[in-house]
Image (cartoon, rainbow, N blue to C red):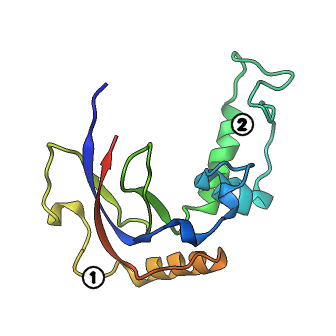
Amino acid sequence: MGQSTDGIICYGFLYGEETGGHPWNDEKWEGDFLEWWYFGLHGAKYVPTCQPFTAAGEYAPGFDKKSDLSPYFDVRKAHRERVGSPPVEWVNSCSCGCPVWLLAVPGTSVEVSRGYPRSIESLGIDVGGPPPMEDVRRFLVFCESQAIKVAKLEWYLGSYWG
């Protein structure tokens, strides 16, 4: 298995330790922001038709590896589509073993693999200014609702080693 170093550009801010503890970091969600977004924050709207897994991740009684689990996953997928994408995107700008997180406005994060350079114009983003104001507004409203202290929003150029 080899190593890769990729370039990353996004519009947002550095999400440091001082930003505090947030609900997706508690024991139930174990830092899984998307799981918290869809099934924690918007969980009241989720009505599963079945529960094939126990809290420990084992098959629940009546289910096994030969069971048709597509109804369970279809309901989860439909719920995610109803809720829609979160108004923030997490960008790791260091490595999987030592993450340095940026909180970015969705649609502004682009990763380019080592050995495959691309022109800025080909990335489909305008680094000459901020992204669409409605995206920035949704981003800021979410951050405020979660008591996330937003530093200055700006373009970041980083790398990912993994």
Q: Position of residue 120 (x, y in %)?
A: 16, 65
Residue 159 placement: quadrant: bottom left
Dot in front, 1 or 2: 1
Query: Measured from the top left, where is residue 80 in percent x and y?
Result: 62, 53
Callout 2, which amino acid? Answer: Tyr
Q: Residue at x 35, y 62 (%)?
A: 109
Estimate how packed mark 2 is, as few (under 14), some (14 to 19) or many (20 or more) residues with alpha carbons within 10 Å: some
Q: Which residue is mark 1?
A: 129
What residue did someone put label 2 on?
A: 72
For residue 53, what is the image quadrant? top right
Quarter of the image holding residue 126?
bottom left
Vertical side of 24 occupied by 134: above or below: below
* Local SS, label 2: helix
Q: Is residue 46 above or below residue 157?
A: above
Task: Give the side of residue 138 with respect to residue 94, left or right.
Answer: right
**Is 134 drawn above or below residue 123 in the view shown?**
below
Query: Toward the viewer: 107 or 55?
Result: 55
Most distant residue in the top direction: 66
In primary-sequence order, the first of circles 1 and 2 is 2
Question: Does dot 1 land on a helix, a strand or a loop?
Answer: loop
Count the marks: 2
Answer with left or right where residue 136 lies relative to residue 148: left
Q: Residues within 10 Å of mark 1 (few under 14, many from 20)?
A: few
User: What residue is rendered at 72% in x and 20% in y?
Assistant: 67
